[in-house]
Amino acid sequence: MKVRQVKPPDAEQLVKLISHVESTSDFMLFEAGERNLSAEQFRKRIESFGEDASTILISENEGALTGYLMVIAGGSKRNKHSAYLVIGISREFRGQGIGKALFAELDNWARKQNLHRLELTVMKTNAPGVALYEKAGFQIEGVKKNSLLVNGEYIDEYYMAKLI
């Protein structure tokens, strides 16, 4: 397995991976088929990286993308030191250390970008996700009550963050 920053030619595979993750997990914000992603849209987004401290880290196995970690930097002077994260791992590769590897690479990349704060939200019911984030050094800062409606049930989310 290899972890690296995404490149414009990865856009088509990345869109397929995101769609696959959203269709095989109840823990993502978007449900299967809820949004229409295009490779061209992602290619342009990837090409714009470097304008701020945003990127997408990807893991690959034998040329196939297996996971992604999106890093969305703050857009103002007051929050440009922080970034919001979204992670997704292909169902077939979950529990195999990909999340750990993506977060390790994130730490290296974030330091080079002079980021100070990394943050994310996670459903309280996502025990594997919470465990991964805690192992990566994230701490629970708060709870968003009834934040999401999943399969007819209101779900709380944790606010989690890590200071670098």
Image (cartoon, rainbow, N blue to C red):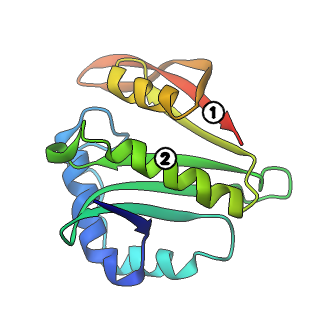
Residue in the picture at 43% in, 67% down: 4
Along the horizontal axis of the image, is 15 left or right of 70?
A: left
Earlier along the polypeptide chain: callout 2 or callout 1? Answer: 2
Residue in the picture at 85% in, 51% down: 78
Labels 2, 1: front one = 2
Check disc 1 and report the residue beneath it: 161
Q: Does residue 46 sit above or below 106 in this rendering? A: below
Along the horizontal axis of the image, is 24 left or right of 163?
A: left
Kind of residue sitting beneath label 2: Phe
Q: CA distance from mark 2 to mark 1?
A: 13 Å
* Residue 13, numbered label: none
Q: Which residue extends farthest front?
A: 1
How many numbered marks appear?
A: 2
Query: In the rendering, at what x and y percent does residue 67 appear?
Result: 31, 54
Query: In the rendering, at what x and y percent does residue 110 appear?
Result: 65, 56
Q: Does residue 75 sit above or below 78 in this rendering? A: below
Residue closest to the eye, 116 or 51: 116
- Image quadrant for the C terminus? top right
Kind of residue sitting beneath label 1: Ala
Q: Does residue 91 sit above or below 13 in this rendering? A: above
> The residue tagged with tag 1: helix, strand or loop?
strand
Residue in the picture at 31% in, 73% down: 38
Along the horizontal axis of the image, is 161 left or right of 67?
A: right
> The residue tagged with tag 2: helix, strand or loop?
helix
Query: In the rendering, at what x and y percent does residue 133 appear?
Result: 48, 31
Check disc 2 and report the residue beneath it: 103
Q: Which residue extends farthest left?
A: 92
Residue in the picture at 58% in, 31% down: 137
Q: Residues within 10 Å of mark 1 (few under 14, many from 20)?
A: many
Query: In the rendering, at what x and y percent does residue 136 appear?
Result: 52, 35
